[in-house]
Amino acid sequence: MNIIIFGPPGAGKGTQSDFIVKNFNLFKLSTGDLLREEIKKKTPLGLKITSIVNSGSLVSDEIINILIETVISNSKYKNRIIFDGYPRNLSQAKNLNTLLSKYNQKINKVIKLQVSLNVIKKRITGRLTCPKCSKIFNEFFNPPPNNMTCCVGELLKKRDDDNVDVAIKRYETYEKSTEPVLEFYKKMNLVKDLNGEMNIESIQSKISDYLTVIEG
Ligand code: AMP
C-alpha cells in the first residue's frame, strides 16, 4: 500500500506518518526531511536550496523529482511508501503517477488533515524536533522531556522555517499550489478527510480505521 498524507504545514503530517510507519510497516518519504538533510550536510544541493526552504517557497520540481525516483525505484520500498509533503503541486502529482506506473505501483489511499491557520501558527511556533531521530514534540500540545533532549542527550531544535512569518507564507503556498492537487486525487476517489485539530491519539485511531479497510 502506498499512501499520501496531505495537509498544511503544522497539520501533524510528520507525527501521524511516524505512527503509520510503525504500525503499518511503511517507509516514510518526506521531501522536507530529505531537503533538510542536504542543508545540514551543506552539500552543493543543500547550499543551493537553503534560502528557498527558509523563505517558505517551494524548491524546483526537477530537484524533487530526482529525490523521489531514488526511493520509488528501490525495490526495498515497493508498495510500502508514505509520501509526506509530496506532491506539492499538480506537476509533481503527475510526475508521481508516471514514476509509480514505471515501477508498477500506484497510490492506494490519501489522507487529508484539515487544520485552521490559527492552530497552525501555534503548532509551528511550538514545534521542536530531535536532530537525530526526527521525533517531533510541541511545547503546547505534546511537551518534550524537561531537559529538552531526545536520543542520548540530543538537544531538541526548532526548524529555521518554523516562525510565524514563514508559517503564513508556507500556508499561502499550500493553499495556492497544493490544495488543487487534492482535486486530482478526489477524482480518483482516494481522499479521506480528517479533522487534524483533534488530539493525536484520536487522529491515529481514525487513520487506523481507514487504513485497515480492505479495498474493494
Ligand atoms: P516540510 O518539511 O514538508 O514542511 O517542507 C519544508 C520546506 O521544504 C517547504 O516549505 C519547501 O521549501 C521545501 N519542500 C518540501 N517538500 C517539497 C516539495 N515536494 N516540493 C517543493 N518544495 C518542497
Image: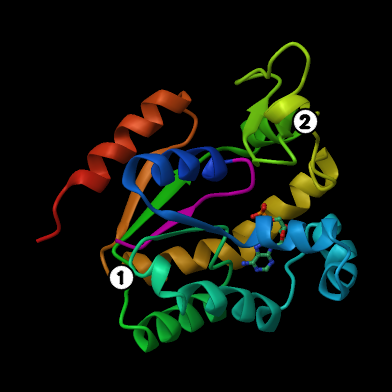
In the image, what residue type sits under mark 1? Answer: Lys
Q: Residue at x 72, y 27 (%)?
A: 152
Q: Residue at x 67, y 31 (%)?
A: 123
9 horizontally vs 115: left or right: right
Q: Is residue 213 above or below residue 12?
A: below
Camera-nearest residue between 114 and 205: 205
Q: Residue furthest front?
A: 152
In the image, what residue type sits under mark 2? Answer: Glu
Dominant SS in magenta: loop
Which label was assigned to residue 154? Answer: 2
Question: Which segment is the magenta one?
Answer: 1-10
Task: Report, in whole angstroms, how far the alpha carbon at label 2 lies from the one at label 1.
Answer: 44 Å
User: How far from the left and from the top, in percent, is residue 30?
Assistant: 58, 57
210 horizontally vs 59: left or right: left
The residue under label 1 is 187
Of the 4 image quadrants, the one containing the C terminus is bottom left
